[in-house]
Amino acid sequence: MNACCRKFGICLSGIHVVRRIAIILAAVPLMSGVAEQALAATSSSTFRFSLPGGAAILYSTASNPQALLPERSCQRAVFHFPNGATFSLLPRIGKSDTAGAEIEPPNESDISPSGQYVVIGRVESGMVSSGPGQSESVLSREYCSVIKIRTGCITADQTGEICGAGWQAGQPAQWGTDDQTNVMLRRDRPSANRVLHFISAGQPPRSIVDDDSGADNVLRCDPPSPASRQAYQKIAIALRAAGAQSEARLIEAGLSKVGDSAPNTPLPSPTETEHLVGIVSVEKAMLYTAPNDARASRAYLVRNDTVTVLKQVPTGWAYVDYVNASGKHLLRWSKAEQLTIKP
C-alpha cells in the first residue's frame, strides 16, 4: 500500500498526490462563555488557552487577527508546562514549514472531567488528481489527538467515528466506550519498545516515528531510562540509516540525559503529579453541572466533606471529584469560596 493509501485509508486506482499534504490542526470552536474565559489575550497577535494544573497552549500568527478571540485561526501553537518548559505543536519540532497549516483554540469540553487530558481535532487535506492532465480535487480527513496535559504525551492520533465519542459525564477520563477509551489513552501510547517492535517488523522507521507524532513525542511519552537505552539506541541507528537525521538527533539528545528528565519534559512537581484537596467550609455547598449559577443540581455537600479539586478554571469555581461511601465518583462544580483548598 502506498503512502497516500495508508494516510487516508482509501486507495483509488490511478490517483497520484500532486501537492504536498497540508496539515491543519483544528479544534471545535468555543461554544460557551465559560470556555472563552480560559482564553486570555497576551498581545495583539497571541493568545493563551489555559489548561488544568497551570499548563497552557499559546497561539500566534493568526490568519484572521481581526476575528473574535475564540474564532481566530492560527499558524503556530506552543504547549507550555507550568515550570516554563515548552514544545511546539505547530509546526512540529524539527519542522519549519507552516504553509497551509492553521490551528484553532479548543473547546473546554475537549478537556477530560479529570483534567488529565485534552483532545485536539485536526483536518489533513491534500490536492489529488486521477492521473496526469486530470483536474485536481481536495481530499480531506478529520483526526483527533489526545494529549496528556501533565507530560505533553500525545497518547493517540485517531480518525473516524471515535473522534466524535466525547468525554463521558460523571467519569474522570472515559472517552466513549471502554474499548474507545483503551484506544485513545492506552493501546497506541508511544514507547521505545513499541517503536522498535514495528521497525524490527520491517516498517519504515521515519513513518513509524511520524505516526507517533515525532521523536520528541515518543520521548515525552516514554522518557529514556537505563531500561530503554538499548531500544532507543537501535531506533536512532535505524532513523539515521533511513535519512531521518533530525529525529535521530532528538533521540540521541534524550539518551545523553538518561538519569535526568527527557528533553522538553518538565521535572515533576507536587502541583503536576497530585491534585489538590478541598474541604467543605460551609454548612451546605451546592453542586453545579457547569460553572454557572443557573446550573445548580440537586446534589450538595456538607461541612467537612472532602473532595479532590481537579481544576480551578474559570476564576471563582472549582471542578471537584467527591467519592461517596460506596466508592462512586460524583464530578460536579462548586464555588471555590465554599472550599478550603489544600495542596
Image (cartoon, rainbow, N blue to C red):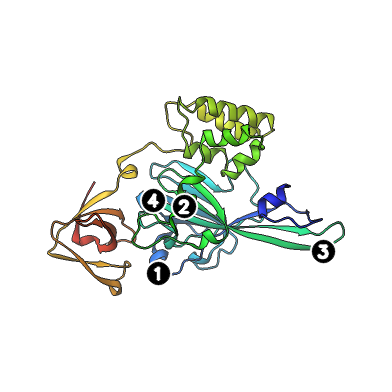
Looking at the image, tell me whether mark 2 or mark 3 is earlier in sequence order. Answer: 2
Q: Are marks 4 and 1 in contact (CB under 8 Å)?
A: no
Mark 2: amino acid: Ile
Can residue 27 be seen here? The reply is no
Looking at the image, tell me whether mark 3 or mark 4 is earlier in sequence order. Answer: 4
Q: Nearer the viewer, residue 58 or 153?
A: 153
Looking at the image, tell me whether mark 4 or mark 2 is earlier in sequence order. Answer: 2
x then y, percent, for residue 156: 52, 48
- Which residue is at 56% across, 63% downward? 65
Residue 33 - label: 1
Q: Nearer the viewer, residue 103 or 116?
A: 116
Give the labeled residue for mark 2. 57
Mark 4: amino acid: Gln
Give the labeled residue for mark 4. 116
Between marks 4 and 1 in the image, the one whose residue lies nearer the viewer: 4
Under circle 4, the secondary element is loop
Under circle 1, the secondary element is helix
* Image quadrant assignment for residue 328: bottom left
Mark 3: amino acid: Ser
Q: CA distance from mark 4 to mark 2?
A: 15 Å
